[in-house]
Image: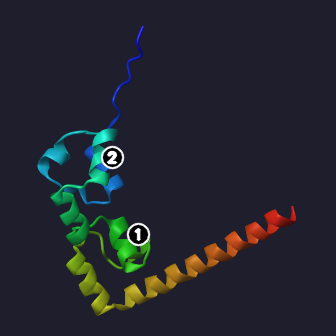
Amino acid sequence: MTEHQSTQTMKPATAAKKLGVYLDATPTDFQEGTVSRAELNALQTDPPQWLRDLRRDGPHPRPVVAAKLGVSIAGLRRGGVDDALTTEQIEALKQEDPEWLRRERATQAEVRKETARVKKLHAERAERD
């Protein structure tokens, strides 16, 4: 008796998230189908032109926008940014440097500093125990 292995598939939204792209900007056939694990791996290792263009120019999903601006996703929301942004829009926002963006970047820097402090504290305690 031979074992029958089923192909793992995922919804387009999951695949888009794993690829770091905004689902609504992907081609229709990608949005309406399912993506197998092998297809996802192929897209990651040898991205087609549409994927390279999306990653370069956007529109980008909120996690990517937040990372490019150096703020949290919650910080984007507090700043009134709820939509996907293109790379050009992100660069314009950086140039404009509004008050909310400066404030959220400072908050994010404090969070990173505190996270590093706590991590160091845990490491020191682990060494003593």
Q: Is residue 119 left or right of residue 71?
A: right
Q: Secondary structure at mark 1?
A: helix
Picture quarter with the N terminus: top left
The amino acid pointed to by label 1 is Ile
Residue 86 against residue 16 in the figure, above or below:
below
Q: Position of residue 64 (x, y in %)?
A: 34, 68
Residue at the top extreme, as displayed:
1
Can residue 84 be seen at all in this image of the molecule?
no
Q: Position of residue 67 (x, y in %)?
A: 39, 73
Residue neighbourhood size for the residue with mark 2, other residues' Cα within 10 Å, grouped as few (<14), some (14–19), many (≥20) = few
Q: Quadrant of residue 70?
A: bottom left
Q: Quadrant of residue 69?
A: bottom left
Q: Position of residue 26 (x, y in %)?
A: 18, 55
Labelled disc at residue 41? 2
Residue neighbourhood size for the residue with mark 1, other residues' Cα within 10 Å, grouped as few (<14), some (14–19), many (≥20) = some
Q: Secondary structure at mark 2?
A: helix
Residue 7 against residue 34 in the figure, above or below:
above
The amino acid pointed to by label 2 is Asn
Q: Is residue 90 left or right of residue 121?
A: left
Query: Which residue carries the number 1 mark?
Result: 73
- The colour scheme applied to this rendered structure is rainbow
Q: Residue at x 28, y 92 (%)?
A: 96
